[in-house]
Image: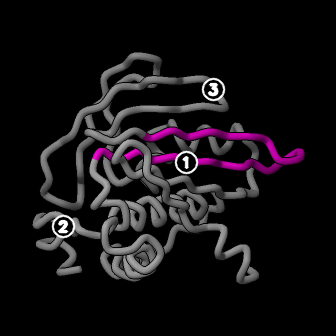
Amino acid sequence: MTEQLDEDRYGKLREEEGRAVITYTRHLHHSRDAVWRALTEDEHVAAWFPTTIDGERALGSALTFRFTDVDISPMTGTILSFEPPSVLEFTWGDDLLHFELEPDGDSQTVLTLTVTMAEFGKAARDAAGWHICLDNLAADLADDRGDVDHGDRWRTANQVYVARFGTEASTVGPPEEWKDTYGDA
């Protein structure tokens, strides 16, 4: 992979009305239908999303997100847009996740994830987490699920995002429950 392509994997930050908005664009070597299944079917979601997603995959459905590796209270959300196989949008606690899939040729897909965060200071922290989630999504699609320390991967990605986004976007660190499981940042 060239340096430029690697650079393209990182989320881009902008501020809108005091909120952090991070946009990731990933080029996946899989059909849009395959990527859609990875975004919406539980057996695939478990490989890349940070929580379980309990609830019907349908417009307006209430969702519950449960952490399985870290002792953090469940969060709730609602599906705001559900347009198979191109758009999925839902709230995740106080944040908004918007996934868009565009075909790229016959068998590839451009995935754009836009994460809107209520708190600007957690942008670097959460950007690192979503970056790793997208890496895990690509690995799941490629049937290449490795056993890697999530804490180390997050710490490495977080350092990159702190440097990219600056101190104002880096005032909030990981929750104590995460530190209890994976160690300090």
Q: Which residue is mark 1?
A: 113
Q: Is residue 123 above or below residue 152?
A: above
Give the extent of the magenta segment. 97-118
Q: Which residue is mark 3?
A: 84
Residue type at tag 3: Pro
Question: Tag 2's secondary structure?
Answer: helix
* Pointer 1 with pointer 2, Cβ within 8 A: no
Left or right side of 15 for 23: right
The picture places residue 133, in percent across and down from the top left corner, at 46, 60
Q: Which residue is mark 2?
A: 178
> At x 76% / y 82%, what residue is drawn?
2
User: Which of label 1 and label 2 is nearer to you?
Assistant: 1
Mark 1 / mark 2, whichever is N-terminal: 1
Q: Are marks 3 and 1 in contact (CB under 8 Å)?
A: no
Mark sitting earlier along the chain (3/1): 3
Q: Position of residue 3 (x, y in %)?
A: 71, 83
Q: Quadrant of the C terminus?
A: bottom left
Q: Compared with residue 113, is residue 93 higher up or lower down, i.e. above or below?
A: above
Main secondary structure along the magenta-highlighted residues = strand
**In-front residue for pair 9/71:** 9
The single residue placed furthest to the top in the displayed view is 60
Q: Does the magenta portion include 148?
A: no
